[in-house]
Amino acid sequence: MNWNKSFGENWGKETHESGGNQKVAGNDRPSGGLPLPFICYLFSSTNNFNADDVVYQVINRITIELYTESKDLEAENAVEAALKDLCWEKSEEYLDDEQCYEIIYEIEV
């Protein structure tokens, strides 16, 4: 399964239906270019399963970042609905410099 392609297609559908913007990001952060809410996802690292001194199963850690102007439970619910078949962790903080909330979801696939 091509997870990135499948997730990207479903992700676009989910976020488009909720009125959100999406972007695949490298190291960039919202800088006034896209209106909020803004979402991006990026590869952060691997947590591979090893057996007999070889990588038996590649496990990618993906970080999904949702940026909102104010606390937006509807946008968070849309992200969580898109992740319904995956195990995920969530954290959030307010970014003073950007004047927005950053909600971070971490998944492994």
Image (cartoon, rainbow, N blue to C red):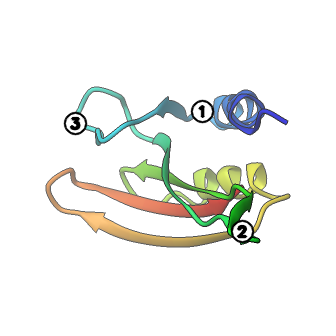
- Mark 1: few, some, or many residues within 10 Å (few <14, many ≥20)? few
Quote the CA–CA distance across marks 1 and 2: 38 Å
Label 2 neighbour load within 10 Å: few <14, some 14-19, many 20+: few
Q: Is residue 36 above or below residue 75?
A: above
Percent x, y for residue 90? 56, 71
Outermost residue to the left: 97
At label 3, which amino acid type do we have?
Answer: Ser
Residue 49 is marked as 2
Disc 1, disc 2: CB below 8 Å? no
Q: Residue at 45% across / 41% down in the picture?
A: 37
Dividing the picture into quadrants, the one containing residue 88 is: bottom right
Residue at image location 39% in from the left, 59% down from the top: 102
Which residue in the structure is indicated by mark 3? 31
User: SS of the residue at dot 3?
Assistant: loop
Closer-to-camera residue (55/17): 55
Residue at coordinates 67% horizontally, 29% vertically from top-left? 12
In this picture, residue 45 sits left or right of residue 75? left
